[in-house]
Amino acid sequence: MTELRDPFKHDHGGHDHEHDHDHDHDEGGELQQIDPALQSLSDALRLCFTVLRWFMVIVIVVYACSNIFNVAANEQAVRLRFGKMAGAEGQRIIPPGGPHLALPFPIEEVIRIPGIRQQVDLDKEFWFEVSASDAARGPEGSAPPGPLNPEKIGSLLTGDANIVHARITFNYLIIDAEKYLQNVGDLETARKLASVAVEEAVVHVAASATADELIRGQFDRQIAARHANGTLERLESGLKVEPETLTLKESRMPNSVREAFLAVANAESEAGQQFELAQRYYRDTLGATAGAAYEVVWKLVEQYQDASARNDKAAVAKLDVEMNRLFSELITSPETNALTVSGKVAEVIQDAQAYRNSLAAKVESEAQLFTSLHDQYRNSPGLRRIIMDRLWQSAREQILTGDIETFYLPKGRAYIDIGRDPEIRKKREAKKIKDEQDARAAASSNLAPAPPSGGPGGP
């Protein structure tokens, strides 16, 4: 009889056991086949998450350090935090140096402010419009003739109601970075603001000057810079114009009056040259007259003339003594003085001194001779006739020497000596006149240098 088995009943023996064993074996094999794939996927995910985590850390670090910066030596910087300057009052400006750290953008933004001078040239504001063809013709043809068109031709109105064209150059600096950022913001605006302030200052200075002064470059830069800086301070721009750089590069008059102005300028230049020549001739004449000490001598001469005109005898006597002392010290003893009297004055004084010395020696010699003859005449009666004849002969020689016509009557007798021939007389007179002319010409050439061209003029 066949035994029926419950297919769901667990049986460890026979077929059922083998069936159960086979089932368990198949399930374990499937698990062993699935585990390595899961493990690989898990390892791959774990590695990806690790790499991603480090990548995010690196990105965060790089982002956090992305606003590290240095400030150059010729600039300043500020940090803007959400559009407003960061830092305490008075500590917002970052000086040159580094490194400095700012929070990453867009939290903080670093604004650099140049500290170098910014140059501005005002070449069109007060100048005329020049075409290429006009500029090729030079200064005479560059300015348009005729009436001025204010829309195309810039100019300055001077204090004497004239018009002048001018070109200006200047430099400005940013001296207050906070005010600059708050009220200006960028270099282009700063340039326009500084230009407008200087233009106003130049108009102000030109209105108090004459056209001749501006044409000659006489421009008061200090007043102009002070006026422009006053405007920039009132606007709290943080800008400053440097006075020493504010310069009038070029100035000229309109073409309609150019020829007249040049004529006046040439006349003034020629007058100045003639005046300088006259001054030089004046100094050379006085120098040739009295030498290095001509100023002292001239002063004494003026004082002497003034005292004589006032008939002040005491002053005249005092000045006589002073002039005698001066001439004695500065001519006879020049080694003791820095300035010496030379030239014609020294020649005249030295000639006078030489004549005085020779005359004194002659008079002294004659006095000695007279004393000797007088003693002989008084003590030797026998020699009196000889002495008288000798004296008479000497006097006769002195009287008849030279070109002199003489009549004399000795005691008891009459003689008339006429020693002239008319031809000889004419020749002697001509020679005398020529000698006098030569002497005057030599004296004039020694007294002063040749006058400059154009006439000596006056001092």
Image: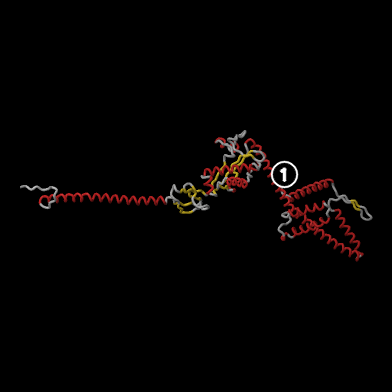
Relative to the observer, which residue lies in front, 394 or 438? 438
Residue drawn at x 88%, y 63% is 373
Whether residue 237 appears in this view of the structure is yes
x, y percent for residue 440: 77, 49
Whether residue 246 appears in this view of the structure is no
Dividing the picture into quarters, in which one does residue 157 lie? top right
Residue drawn at x 61%, y 43% is 202
Q: Is residue 259 above or below residue 284?
A: above
Residue at the extreme bottom: 379
> Residue under circle 1?
455
Q: Is 172 situated left or right of 360 in this image? A: left
Relative to the observer, which residue lies in front, 157 or 101? 101
Q: Is 48 situated left or right of 110 in this image? A: left
Residue at the extreme top: 146
Relative to the observer, which residue lies in front, 62 or 426? 62
User: Judging from the image, what secondary structure is the residue with disc 1 in?
Assistant: loop
x, y percent for residue 93: 51, 51
Residue drawn at x 6%, y 47% is 2
Q: How is the image coloured?
A: secondary structure
Amino acid under label 1?
Answer: Gly
Q: Is residue 20 above or below residue 371?
A: above
Q: Is 160 situated left or right of 406 in this image? A: left
Q: Is 25 situated left or right of 322 in this image? A: left
Q: Residues within 10 Å of mark 1 (few under 14, many from 20)?
A: few
